[in-house]
Amino acid sequence: MKAFSALLDTVVYTSSRNRKLALIADYLRAAPDPDRGWALAALTGELDFPGVKSSTIRNLMKERVDPILWTLSRDFVGDTAETASMLWPSAAAEAEEDAEPASLSETVDALAHLTRVTAPKELSKLLDRLDANGRYALIKLATGGMRIGVSARLAKTAFAQAFDVSVEAVEEYWHALDAPYAELFAWAADGGAPPDIANRPHFRPFMLAHPLEEAEVNLTDYAAEWKWDGIRVQIVKTGDQTRLYSRSGDDISASFPELLDALPMDGVLDGELLVRGTAQGGGAASFNALQQRLGRKKVSKKMLAEAPAFVRLYDALLIEGEDLRELTWTDRRTALEGLMPRLPAAQFDLSALVAARDFAGLAKIREGTREDAIEGLMLKRRDSPYIAGRKTGLWYKWKRDPLLIDCVLMYAQRGSGRRSSFYSDYTFGCWNGDPEEGAELLPVGKAYSGFTDAELKKLDKLVRQTTLNRFGPVREVERTLVFEVAFDSVHTSKRHKSGLAMRFPRIHRIRWDKPVHEADRIESLRALIRD
């Protein structure tokens, strides 16, 4: 654990992306197997220990330090692992000072065998054998909440740099292998044969798009296609196994069982996962409807009947053993169109192309469509191959301009990571009537992006100076500030007092100048709902 603890301690205080890459690469080259494989799994969020929850840590701490001290300290620090690692009684550590800390592999094995019943006692023993840095690493490892500024993509890039292989190749093998990735290290680090994944369904990295700047493209070289508002997925069939992968490569098959017998041939198809809505005559429902099904390990018959899932296809990567990724978009589209008659219409349809004579006409079409299931347009170069990642000049996304509404700041919560010392997460509301006649504010959304570091400091100061009530890490503030909030759509919601929920809210502008009574009312937001 010492080397892994040292890695986390260094990375968490490093803001430079290149420095983080170098630190992780150095660790992966130097650490033994299987420790480095488990470290890589931890950094990419692939480990899960059901016997340990954040509440386990909180309960252990409240048994060892004054509960009020723990609560105040956790509120101030903003991170459970960091707070617990510093407050863990030193007397316990001194009693075990002669005990050698377990290796990372031994620690992973111990955590994997914990249950809710055994976790408190066994986790205490592990913590007693570690110093503050080690305790921090152990808690992060056990609870699965790294939040140290290292994304899964960055960790895989570091692996690629460590052993001079392409990150695209790493990602192609990655999702077919299990931690601690012995086959991956044998190939990249030891010069062995590439992992044999031919007979395993696995994820291929998506081709992604750049935001569009109109001057960048000649429309005659590009095909325009709707950008649908679901989640990008890849459906893969190999032999008798079918998997559904999200954009990040997560296996979400269990949440959408109706799609797992749908492909009649081996293949890898790229598309948008949507659900059908009765109000739309069987067309694509809003993202809010899809969200009800995300993350479910079991799906009821009622949900399958009321919100059946389907995939609106964009592209074909492989069909019956033929890899199409080197072909042009035009040729892949032709192959996909030829495939459609063989696919069940209940589970698959084809994303429509959009015809326009020029950008002005395309812009008019883009802004004139405010259906819930459409985000905007995609522009795809007709001669482009299917290349993992974002390659300039090939694909562009042209989202609709966001909807805007003025809301009043109501609550603020501490952030996490480097923002743990700031109140950076903001809940805002709209008036449920005329504020001059006693109307109240109802929360309609929460955002933590859209402002600069300088604005964050100013907002944090305002929160501290106008606090009305404290609820743990949350503060209720005086109603003095208006946010202009951007969002993609709004839907009805039974979970919120206002009855509404925003899709992708973010702070567009801070209206320091605007009186709060001039903020928008609930009716204005409700009028933007598209059934």
Image (tube, rainbow, N blue to C red):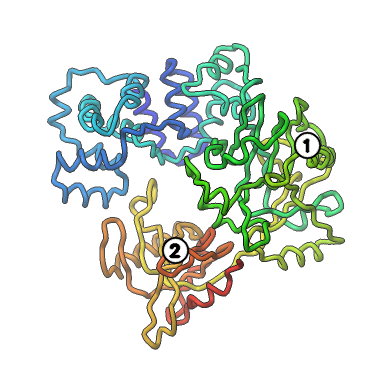
Mark 2 element type: loop
Could you say which disc has been placed on residue 14 in the image?
none
Q: Which residue is mark 2?
A: 494
What residue is rendered at 73% in x and 63% in y?
Answer: 366
Q: Position of residue 210 (x, y in %)?
A: 68, 48
What residue is rendered at 31% in x and 33% in y?
Answer: 51
Three-letter amino acid code at the position of disc 2: Lys
What distance separates the C-alpha of mark 2 from that of mark 1? 45 Å
**Which of 84 and 284 lies nearest the eye of the viewer?**
284
Lateral position of residue 349 relative to residue 1, left or right: right
Mark 1 element type: loop
54, above or below 372, in the image: above
Lateral position of residue 327 relative to residue 26, left or right: right
Q: Quadrant of the C terminus?
A: bottom right
Three-letter amino acid code at the position of disc 1: Pro
Q: Quadrant of the N terminus?
A: top left
Lateral position of residue 411 relative to residue 359, left or right: left
Q: Position of residue 287 (x, y in %)?
A: 58, 56
Q: Position of residue 511 (x, y in %)?
A: 48, 73
What residue is rendered at 59% in x and 37% in y?
Answer: 245
**Which of 410 and 259 lies nearest the eye of the viewer?**
259
Proximity of marks 2 and 1: CB atoms separated by less than 8 Å: no
Q: Position of residue 83 (x, y in %)?
A: 26, 42
Mark toward the start of the polypeptide (2 vs 1): 1
Q: Which residue is mark 1?
A: 385
